[in-house]
Amino acid sequence: MKRFGFLGTWVWLGVAGLAAPGALGQWNTPNPVVSFEKRADGLEVRQKDGVLRLEVKAEDVLHVTYSALAGPGDGAAPERASDAVVVKKDWPGAAFEVSSDEKTVTLSTTKLKAVIERASGALRFMGTDGKTLTTDSYRSLRRVEVNGEKALHAEVVFAIYGSHEGFYGLGQHQAGVWNYRGETVDLSQENTNIAIPLLVSTNGYGIFWNNASRSRVNNRFVHALYLSAEVADRVDYYFFYGPEADQIIGHYRELTGEVPLFGRWAYGFWQCRSEEHTSELQSLRHL
């Protein structure tokens, strides 16, 4: 009975693990590189199951997309609702180089390196000092049905094993959490919850998840970060390198547009009852 109980426990844990959200990402089969091509704006990599594109927007900004195979040339993805959020369409670009060896294909700018492993298709982001920032270890597009319509479910798995980074941003939520390491956050608009799909890491990078559907940031398994969208036509995100948070937020504002402040009249009347000065009271007449 004890032996059966022990075996039953392991079977139950295995089934529970397979049923857990994002658990499938832990046993993904390799998606090797088949071929690659340097383009005027970046790099296109054809993998066994899809096409990975890296567009160099600036020396520290990369636009990463991954689309399902559709045939010769594959074609550009159609305009999506999330494209309206990206207000900056024309970028000056930046100088970059593409190199390769038996194991990797590398795109390099003066501030950033993107290294693609030929055998697995994993995409490693690195600083010019050789330090790994994070690794996009697997990208998937899975066919699903949402509200009776055929769609694709997009997911990216970032391998962060051994990293002690913190995760910030993502908008306004009611869980009382500031650092989202080890947490799961649903990105959807609800009363008192405001989703902003910008993740800022203390490792010096930011990720803008460019998808307008309901999404999720899942770091419940602390060695892996899952970004997923319920409806998508491709995996789509922007990778910002800071390394300071101000620089990352600056890139986000540049990409999505600056938000102006309201006029002074919109902020209401604030008065401290503990101390008042005549000059302060006189200034209220001008508001």
Image (cartoon, rainbow, N blue to C red):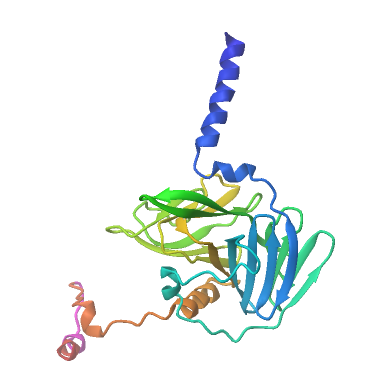
Q: Which residues are magenta?
A: 274-281
Quarter residue 201 falls in: bottom right
User: Is 273 above or below relative to 102?
Assistant: below
Rendered view: 111 above or below 102: below
Residue at coordinates 81% horizontally, 59% vertically from top-left?
103
Q: Does residue 134 appear left or right of residue 227 in this picture? A: right
Which residue is located at x 69 percent, y 53 percent? 31
Furthest-right residue in this view: 102
Quadrant assignment for the C terminus: bottom left
Residue 108 visible: no
> Does residue 81 show up?
yes
The verdict on residue 90 being magenta is no
Q: Is residue 132 left or right of residue 77?
A: right
Q: Which residue shows up at 53% across the image and 69% down it?
A: 77
Q: Residue shown at 25%/84% (left/top)?
A: 264
Residue 270 placed where, x, y %?
21, 76
The foreground one among 158 and 234 is 234
Q: Position of residue 3 (x, y in %)?
A: 62, 12
Instruction: Measuring from the top left, give residue 17's x and y in whole percent.
Output: 54, 35
Closer-to-camera residue (61/25):
25
How many marks are shown on the rendered structure?
0
- Image quadrant where residue 115 sits: bottom right
Q: Is 93 above or below relative to 169?
A: below
Quadrant assignment for the N terminus: top right
39 or 278, which is in the foreground? Answer: 39
The residue lying toward the viewer, choosing from 116 and 231, is 231
Q: Name above or below for residue 219 compared with residue 40.
A: above
